[in-house]
Image (cartoon, rainbow, N blue to C red):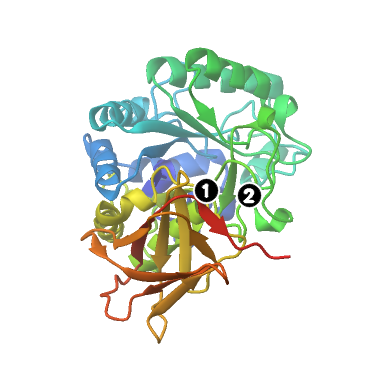
Amino acid sequence: MFIHYGLYSGLAGEIQGKKYKGCVEWIMQYSGVDSETYAREALPRFKPKRGKAETWVKLAKEAGCVYTILTSRHHEGFNMFDSKFSDFNVKTTKGVDIVKEYAEACKKYGMKAGYYFSLLDWSHPDYDPTGSGISYPKGNYEAQKQGRRQFGNHEKYKDYLYNIFNELLTSYAPVDLVWWDFSQPGFQGDKAWNATALMKNLFEKNPKAIQNNRLYHSANHLSEGGIRVTPAWKGDYSTAEHHIPATGINGDWEACQTLNGTWGYSADNQEWKTSQALIRELIDTVSRGGNFLLNIGPMPDGSIPPESIRIFKEIGFWMKKNGEAIYGTRANPLNIELTWGRLTRKGEDITYIFVYDKPDNGELTIPCSFEGDVKAVLLGGEKTVNMSQDKKSNTTTFYIKNMKMDTAATVIKVMGKRMIHKRSA
């Protein structure tokens, strides 16, 4: 579960009477207001309540998530944790330390605690984006021209970034995962963020922690020419955003996705995806070797929108029956992707077949066969699924004409010795 909650949540997609629809956590940049105007507009409308962080983690647990990632700070520069280095934080403004409550909830529910950490800061006086190629509110540029704002010493900003990250690591341990965001070709790594020092501090505090690749400019978007693996020293995994690579990535990766096209809370956006579509995106991701990170955007007080709760619970219901075909599995072992569904495998003796659409003749044929005693059952009820193998053509056919289908995906578990793949020329 990805959790986008910050000062922008109070605005709910509207500032100075104008509404914005998509990715409203960027509303400061979209509207162009300067940092003083943004704070004046947003602070009164952000009303976090105690106990809400536990509801997020509890829902994640019910949905079958094994890790969560909370926005500890977004590009607006508002820290969701107590800090002695900046008064622009949730503790000094509202008295509720959101990150503290979140960290405690993760411990309570046995959840891996991840933190999104923006490297940008549209409000800090020492942050200087000049020439970086990174989007910045035009209002701050105008304020600088008028002498109302000074771009400071970016080297000092990098010290500030290190100090608040160190606070996160030491005061809210354990930090199991860090989701950095983001860099550009001319503004990345040590030059922009002192990346080496940040990474070293993370691993010294928690050697088992993992991190994504966004301390550097990495190919995580289709607009950048496709998703590619980056060198390990730049991060542990790639982060495909709003996209599931058609053939996966040759390395560790994660696809992050929204429920309605925006990460932060929008009061007007009701373009909710179906749980069926999202379950299939989860399966598509895992069958191609990745993890799936699905977002919620809590409301101004931290409550989860009812539609988000419904979707996550429906996914959780499906996962309770079919989760073994997701957890601890590897990508589809075949060299093709099936038109009617997907495959995952566990070890060399178990294959899971996800059926999206039942063929008209009720027969599913996969281009591989199995050795030794083979058995196929329907996950959930363990009902036997009839099957036959043709060793000559190296195919296996499953007969499901009378099988009752799940609307999202029905899963067949095939237990047999080593699978023999039919390879193309």
Measured from the top left, where is residue 23 in percent x and y? 50, 55
- Look at 68% across and 27% down and name the residue there: 233
Residue farthest bottom in this picture = 360
Instruction: Look at the picture and state if 50 lies above or below 420.
Output: above
Measured from the top left, where is residue 222 in percent x and y? 67, 57
Note whether residue 343 is visible. yes
- The amino acid sitting under disc 2 is Ile
Instruction: State the residue in front, 61 or 124.
Output: 61
Instruction: Look at the picture and state if 241 lies above or below 119.
Output: below
Instruction: State the residue in front, 10 or 418.
Output: 418
- The amino acid sitting under disc 1 is Gly
Query: Of helix, strand and loop, which one carries label 2?
Result: loop
Instruction: State the residue in front, 330 or 375.
Output: 375
Q: Which residue is mark 1?
A: 290
Give the quarter of the figure containing the N terminus.
top left
- Look at 43% across and 56% down and name the residue there: 282
- The quadrant in which residue 359 appears is bottom left
Instruction: Look at the picture and state if 110 lies above or below 52.
Output: above
Query: Of helix, strand and loop, which one carries label 1?
Result: loop
Measured from the top left, where is residue 340 in percent x and y? 47, 73
Q: Which residue is mark 2?
A: 249
Q: Residues within 10 Å of mark 2 (few under 14, many from 20)?
A: some
- Look at 38% across and 55% down and name the residue there: 373
Measured from the top left, where is residue 209 in percent x and y? 49, 25
